[in-house]
Every structure is written in C-alpha cells, then in structure tokens.
Image: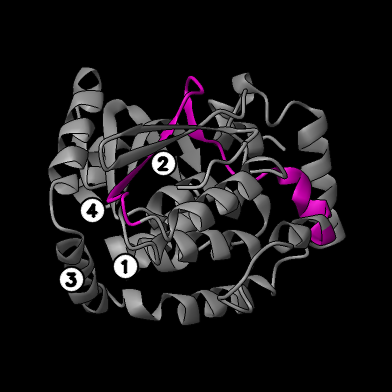
Amino acid sequence: MTAHNYESLRISRSGSVLTATMHNPPLNLLDRVLIPDLKRFVRAVADDETVKVIVLDSAVPEFFAAHVDVGYGADPDGFARLSSEDTGFEGLLPLQHLVASIRALPQVTIAKLRGYLRGGGNELAMAADLRYAAADQTWLGQIEGRLGIIPGGGGTQLLARAIGRSRTLEAVLTADLYDTRTAELYGWITRAVPAADLDRVVDEIAHRIGSRLPSQIRAAKAAIDPATAGDRLPEDLRTEAAALAHVYPSPPEVEQALSAALADGMQTVENERDLENFLDKH
C-alpha cells in the first residue's frame, strides 16, 4: 500500500490485516477533513493484494463517528465539493460514493464499534462487511429525521438490506437511538461483544479471515452479494439521492433551526451524548 499522510487517520498493519483508526476529535465528525481522508484511504488500499482484511476503528472516546457535519445543512455547495476527487459511481452524493467504494473493496471490511454513531457515522459502519460492537457501550441511529431530511449516505439502502423494510422505516422516521441489544436483535450489527473483549474478538476474527486465500475472499463476496442485492447498490443509492432531493437543500425554516442548534451547542461532546433530546428542544 502506497504511503499516505492523513490528517485524521492512523494506519497500522499486522500481517494481512490493515487497521484505519479515525482520529478527528472531539466527535469524529464526517467533515472536510475526515471524509476526504477516508476516500483517499479506500482508493489507496483497493489495489493492494497483500491486504486481505481492513478494520475501521476510532481513537476518539465515546464516538465511533458522530455524523456528517451539520454545517453542510446550509452549505450544499460545500457538501458537493467533498466529491471533488471522486471517480466512478457517477451520480452519487459524497457519502454515498464513500460507502459504495467501501462495499466494492476486494478485502473484507470490519467496523469495530464503540460509542455513538448516528447518521453518516452509522452509514459508514453499515458499509462494512462485518460490524462488532461493544455491548452496552455502543449506540446507533439515523438522526436525519430530526434534522428535517432523510439519510443521504446510503442509510436507507444499507439498513434495508440488513434489517428489512419495516425496521428501516422505523429507524429512519423515528430517528431514535438504538442500543446494542436491539441492534443485535434486528441484525443491524453482526454481534455485540462484551466491551472488555471487543479488541480481542475483532483481532481474532480479522486474522482468521486474513489467513484465507484472496481468491476465497473474492469468491465468497461474489457469491453472497447478489443474494442481498449488494450488486445493485450503486443504482439503489441513486434512488436514495433522488428521494433526498425532496428535502435537501432544506427549506429556510429548517436551516434556521439547524443554525440555532449549532449556535446553542450542537456538535459538542456534552450535547451529542443526548442528541435526540437536544434536537427535540429545538
């Protein structure tokens, strides 16, 4: 893998397993720093045949990845610029392009989850092939309903593939936060693991998969993806983008509410812990 300098990623390697640890404190916001870094990382690793497994982790306490920077709610042009380096997957929105690129990787991708992940943070995790979460220390949700929009980074498509139509409608339209017990029951995560065991379990699984032949990994993904409509993901993401256009860019009253919420402390650690109640008061 070609060496790259990333502002918000720490890259480490153990045999055929490569770990990308997000470090964009205080929240791991998906913003003008983290999103381009993730896109560059995916492009760099895609052709590296010596890497069989990629683990996506967080070094930020309490947050895997909070969500997309809400400042883009009033800055659609700035959001569009996040696609400036994208190639392939024409017609996709910036975060959709990232999740489609992750899904297209020949390696097995694993999201190691601790803390909060809402909106784009959850979509990033859903793009991974496998998701292991620290039990009782991980909370997931699609917050967009409380922001006047719907998911636009693959949430409608990736969640529906994992948990079905009715549960996806519930998650998208309530915009509630889900604990690991419910997420595991729904199939939202692969498995909830005792927090103290998460690092060990993910490491063992990553290296066990990493011991397989590259041809086995490619064959398994090629056989399984069509069964879950994974081969249609780019097309289905374009359907999501068309639906999002009905609510984004947001009407003035929504932009004003978001601006007021940002001014009042949204995207601070304290308020992000209880973001649903914070937004309900605004």
Q: What is the spatial separation of the Cα atoms under label 3 and label 2, in whole angstroms?
A: 31 Å
For disc 2, the marked residue is 140
Q: Residue at x 37, y 61 (%)?
A: 159
Q: Which residues are magenta?
A: 49-77
Q: Nearer the viewer, residue 171 or 244?
A: 244
Instruction: Estimate the spatial distance between the alpha carbons at disc 3 and disc 1, rounded to whole Å.
Output: 20 Å
Between the residue at mark 4 and the residue at mark 1, the CA separation in whole angstroms equals 10 Å
Q: Amino acid at mark 1?
A: Arg
For residue 219, the mark is 3
Of labels 4 and 1, earlier in sequence is 1
Report whether residue 151 is seen: no
- The reply to whether the C-beta atoms of the residues labelled 3 and 2 are less than 8 Å apart is no
Residue 12, x across and y down, in percent:
41, 31
| Nearer to me, 118 or 93 | 93
Disc number lying in front (4 or 3): 3
Locate residue 103 relative to residue 15 in the image: left or right: right
Q: Is residue 232 magenta?
A: no
Q: Position of residue 264 (x, y in %)?
A: 78, 27
